[in-house]
Amino acid sequence: MSSLVWLVISLGGAMLLHRYYFKERIQNLQTPPGAHWLWGHEKAAFDETCGAFYSRWFEQYGPAFKIRGAFGYGEILVVGDPEALAHIFIRRTYDYVKSPVFRPLIERLLGRSVIWVEDADEHSRMRRFMSPCFTAQQIRANTNEIASATRQFEQKLRDYVVSQNGNATINLLDWTWKVTLDIIGQVGFSHDFRCGESEDGKAIAKAWHDQVNMAMNFGGFVAPLLIRQFPWIVNLPVEAIQAPGKVKTIVKRLGKEFIERQETVNGTDLLSVLIRENSRVARDEQDSTDQLLDHTCTFVMAGHETVAGALNYTLWELAKNPSIQDKLRAELQAFDGEPTYDDFQRPSLAYLDAVLKEILRLHGPSSHMEKVALKDDVIPFSLPVRGKDGKLVTSIPIKAGQMIYIPSISAQRLSSVWGDGDVFRPERWLAPNELPPDSVLHKGWSKLFAFSQGARNCIGTRLAIYEYKVVLTTLIRNFVFHDTGAEILSRFTASLQPRVVGKEQDGPALPCRITLSAVN
């Protein structure tokens, strides 16, 4: 009997078992109507722009409900309640682990580093080991490298716009990755990707583009669902499954070459810091070279792609809101000289800070998470929801093995909390009385969930924010961004990714018209 037949039989059996085992495991939460017999609610969520399905039902039911999983998987809990997320991510951090879909893909893309590891002791050890790489002092030591890469990028973009008679329409995604990859290459392990023009830079860009493009299509929707049912699929020699490993292979090769050149003794790059830290601990506690390179791969990929994504959505929102763009430009051009690391922490650049917070609220790069409960538990709510019986529900009991979806892009847009949750309005961050009360906000950075929260919050938050502000300051001072009118649909792959409605075949894209700033 062929493997395909066995797969179909196994899938059918799994559907029946899951329908039985997960029947009404989540008591008294509402379920959206219209679940498909095969896809449950998951394809309906996939067909819309990222988060729209969950936002709609959060507004109707409150920030907790349940959906039917595809292939008969059963009931999936969907939560955006701030108290529920604090419970999962802060108070019970290690009782909720990444879903069996995400973890093997993280290993293939980034290796077995701090994002992948689940064991509490090992995760804590990794965090302590890596923390010296992300101190304010360490970032200050790399400001010249960040500034140099940004200036090189600005000149390359300027030359292109001038070549188009000062008025060019670009795909933002084709440009922002160049500067963020350059920055993280220099800061990560003193490697020059030459503004994306090196062979290694081009190879990383192609591998990442191919992976994102596959993940945005229907096959990218189905593949994780099959992996969820049959985890062994991740080991099949299929291009779509093995593609993420190409990026890791390139980065680890470059890092190994860097170590072999013995350029780590006095370096300020992150890999040099890691090697020095490694030499200070007992030999039986030291990480292997391969583990150090996994850390470096995490720096490079998680660092450059997420910042590039935030920049893309920022420029797109500013292009659609020229008055906000003008206000930001006025603040940045009024600042005398180039802002330092400390300048970016001060009130003189408050509007820049407000733009960043508003973008991370609306378009956080990590806009969707999936967790699985390791133990029976009771999850509390700070925003009670109306149960199926019409009564208010303030907590929900769950069983070990329960799948939980956390669409943070929806949780941060609740109009019941923000009033105008889907509106890009940085001004809300400038006056304390504009913000909702703390009781209905999240417990992460700036009351957002953008960098997660608790013991597993983003270890590189400080570096990512500084990098974002340096690049955005340079771009807004020197260029003007204009809306093209393109309709954008966003999908979550490894991070939030946009593409143009009607041009899906072109892959991830965010078109924007760009001209030179009159001041420059």
Image (cartoon, rainbow, N blue to C red):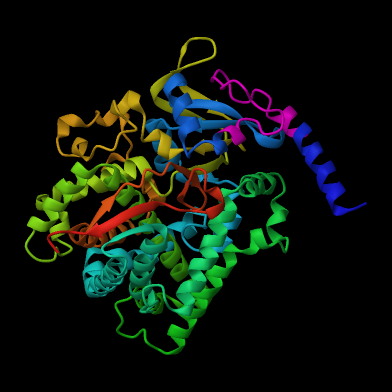
Q: Is residue 21 above or below residue 370?
A: above
Which quadrant of the view contains residue 144? bottom left
Which residue is most to the right? 1
Numbered-mark total: 0
Quadrant assignment, res 125: bottom left
Which residue sits at x=49%, y=9%?
A: 390
Residue 329 percent coordinates (x, y): 16, 52
Q: Nearer the viewer, residue 365 or 477?
A: 477
**Left or right, 372 with reference to 144:** right
Residue at 31% across / 81% down in the picture? 267
The residue that appears at 74% across and 28% down in the rendered structure is 20
- Asked whether 29 falls inside the magenta stretch, the response is yes
Q: Position of residue 475 (x, y in %)?
A: 24, 60
Whether residue 445 is visible to the viewer of this picture, yes or no, is: no
> On the picture, is 473 further left or further right than 93?
left
Magenta segment's dominant SS is loop
Along the viewing direction, whichever of 146 and 484 lies nearer the viewer: 484
Magenta stretch: give its range: 17-44
Q: Residue at x 52, y 57 (%)?
A: 116
The correct choice, above or below, for 495 with respect to 92 in the image is: below
Q: Give 156 or 409, whichever is nearer the viewer.
A: 156
Compared with 253, 399 (above or below) is above
Q: Is residue 270 above or below residue 122?
A: below
* Picture coordinates of residue 271, whole percent (x, y): 39, 75
Q: Residue furthest top?
A: 390
With 332 as the anchor, is 492 left or right in this view?
Answer: right
Q: Residue furthest front?
A: 165
Q: Residue furthest bottom?
A: 261
- Relative placement, left or right, of 495 versus 360 is right
